[in-house]
């Protein structure tokens, strides 16, 4: 997926105003949601995007949002609840999450889902995914989503500016008063919302906060350099969850024109993951961040997702992580009529993959315990099936840093807090630049989900700040 390069019809501004009500930095989902919420509250809102494209990491994601209690779940007969959602979030996060932020998400996720649908966002077939006790991954076209939000914001007077990187937060000693751009121009604001994303594309910050990602691949929005993080840190902002940065499993092992950044997760539909010795190395139903950690310490780093035609039949080109058939068309899968042939095709030690698959199949057929503890396909959903229907496939898979899922400390009003827990006056943040919500792990759909939920709240609260601006 690519960013929204065409701006026809979007509320693009070419002249930087001297002062606005709410100033938003970053044009991913968190920033676009904040812009619209501020405009809906009646404030003059401006969004600055450092690159020439709208989208950031949002349009490089799989486009899944984790919501519970939706119309689509009801139509598919899926039983889910806010209580189950909350428990899953805390469980996946190793209970290192800020429970107040988890509760905030649970309280506002359904109304945000309805708000997004009210602006024209459409969701497809619901899928189960990592960390979910019930299927709650709601797929959407993220490019169209951002386009809809920005157009709605424009109708309410909001504006966006591209190629306008912020460099410093302006501060008068008691509150943030605006932003200084990289070219030296200033724009004053009653409140500022940081929605600048993470730092997956900044090797220096990754080396500082996540040296364990040294051998990981790197993807993400081109602007994900940690700008907002550094700007807020310069004012004493606190940080959360930096030791918990993890990579994402399933990315193609080298650069490829058809790798859009999401990778695939055939493991959640029936595949096993094996290393260069032909051995499994993890419970494949676990969170794909945990699988990614395990893959990084395997010999040679590159691993393979191995599956059969049964899993291939579950391919879904509308959901990037399940676009198995698309990977075959792009030449990104090895294929063979037998397991032995596949083993030879990908260069594993003779007999190693054959033995691994036979042992895996035998345990399933005889009801024996899996040596890695696997009992489901993904999270708590689905039952493993034998890999026994030719043809057979293998996807060379690496671990990629797509997002950093850590960052600024915020409270339930999305105010940025300093190291001592006090709000930095009139500074708000939402999306990947924030920490505290995910804790030590990540449930599929909560990156896009929290960007929508918390971005909307940040814009709403920022708009409530006292203003002398006539609008």
Image: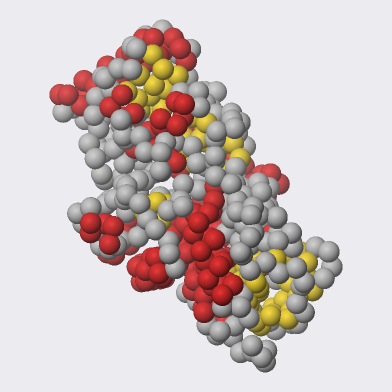
Quadrant location of the C terminus? bottom right
Q: Position of residue 219 (x, y in %)?
A: 60, 42
- Furthest residue in direction top, as rendered: 350
Give the quadrant of residue 422.
Answer: bottom right
Check the image and report above or below for 459 versus 55.
below
Residue 292 appears at what percent x and percent y?
47, 37
Q: Nearer the viewer, residue 460 or 426?
A: 460
| 393 over 187 or under it: above or below | above
Q: Residue furthest right?
A: 184
Report the number of numbered marks. Answer: 0
Give the residue displayed 74% in from the left and 63% down from the top. 164
Task: Please identify the quarter of the rendering in which residue 362 is found.
Answer: top left
- The extreme front residue here reads 8
Can residue 348 be seen here? The reply is: yes
Q: Is residue 325 left or right of residue 11?
A: left
Q: Is residue 141 above or below residue 384?
A: below
| Residue 267: image location, x then y, percent | 36, 33
Q: How is the image coloured?
A: secondary structure
- Residue 70 placement: quadrant: bottom left
Which quadrant of the figure contains the N terminus? top right
| Residue at left offset 31%, top offset 47% | 128
Residue 18, image x, y percentages: 77, 79
Say if residue 240 shows up in the picture. no
Residue shown at 47% from the left, 57% from the top: 448
Q: Residue at x 36, y 9 (%)?
A: 340
Closer to us: 398 or 9: 9
- Quick check: 286 left or right of 157? left
């Amino acid at each position: 997926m690519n960013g929204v390069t065409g701006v026809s019809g979007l509320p693009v501004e070419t002249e930087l105003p001297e002062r606005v009500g709410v100033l938003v930095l970053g044009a991913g989902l968190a920033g676009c949601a904040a812009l619209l919420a501020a405009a809906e509250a009646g404030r003059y809102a401006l969004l600055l995007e450092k690159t020439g494209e709208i989208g950031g990491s949002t349009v490089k994601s799989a486009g899944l949002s984790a919501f519970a209690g939706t119309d689509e779940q009801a139509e598919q007969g899926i039983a889910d609840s806010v209580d189950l959602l909350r428990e899953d979030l805390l469980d996946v996060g190793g209970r290192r999450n800020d429970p107040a932020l988890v509760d905030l998400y649970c309280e506002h996720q359904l109304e945000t889902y309805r708000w997004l649908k009210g602006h024209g966002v459409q969701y497809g077939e619901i899928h189960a995914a990592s960390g979910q006790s019930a299927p709650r991954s709601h797929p959407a076209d993220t490019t169209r989503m951002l386009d809809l939000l920005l157009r709605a914001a424009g109708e309410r007077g909001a504006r966006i500016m591209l190629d306008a990187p912020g460099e410093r937060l302006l501060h008068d000693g008691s509150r943030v008063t605006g932003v200084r751009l990289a070219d030296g121009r200033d724009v004053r604001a009653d409140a500022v919302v940081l929605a600048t994303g993470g730092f997956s594309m900044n090797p220096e910050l990754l080396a500082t906060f996540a040296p364990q990602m040294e051998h990981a691949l790197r993807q993400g929005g081109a602007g994900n350099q940690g700008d907002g993080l550094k700007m807020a840190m310069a004012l004493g902002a606190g940080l959360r969850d930096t030791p918990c940065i993890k990579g994402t499993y399933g990315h193609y092992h080298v650069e490829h024109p058809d790798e859009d950044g999401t990778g695939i997760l055939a493991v959640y539909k029936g595949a096993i993951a094996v290393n260069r010795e032909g051995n499994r190395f993890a419970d494949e139903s676990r969170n794909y961040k945990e699988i990614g950690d395990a893959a990084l310490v395997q010999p040679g780093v590159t691993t393979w997702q191995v599956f059969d035609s049964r899993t291939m039949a579950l391919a879904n080109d509308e959901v990037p992580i399940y676009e198995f058939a698309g990977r075959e068309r792009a030449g990104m899968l090895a294929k063979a009529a037998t397991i032995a042939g596949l083993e030879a095709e990908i260069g594993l030690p003779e007999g190693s993959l054959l033995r691994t698959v036979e042992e895996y199949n035998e345990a399933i057929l005889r009801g024996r315990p899996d040596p890695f503890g696997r009992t489901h396909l993904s999270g708590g959903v689905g039952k493993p099936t034998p890999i026994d229907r030719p043809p057979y496939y293998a996807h060379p898979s690496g671990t990629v840093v797509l997002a950093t899922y850590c960052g600024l400390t915020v409270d339930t009003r999305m105010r940025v807090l300093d190291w001592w827990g006090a709000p930095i006056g009139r500074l708000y943040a939402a999306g990947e630049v924030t920490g505290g919500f995910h804790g030590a792990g990540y449930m599929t759909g909560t990156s896009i989900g929290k960007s929508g939920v918390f971005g909307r709240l940040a814009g709403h609260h920022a708009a409530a700040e006292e203003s002398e601006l006539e609008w």
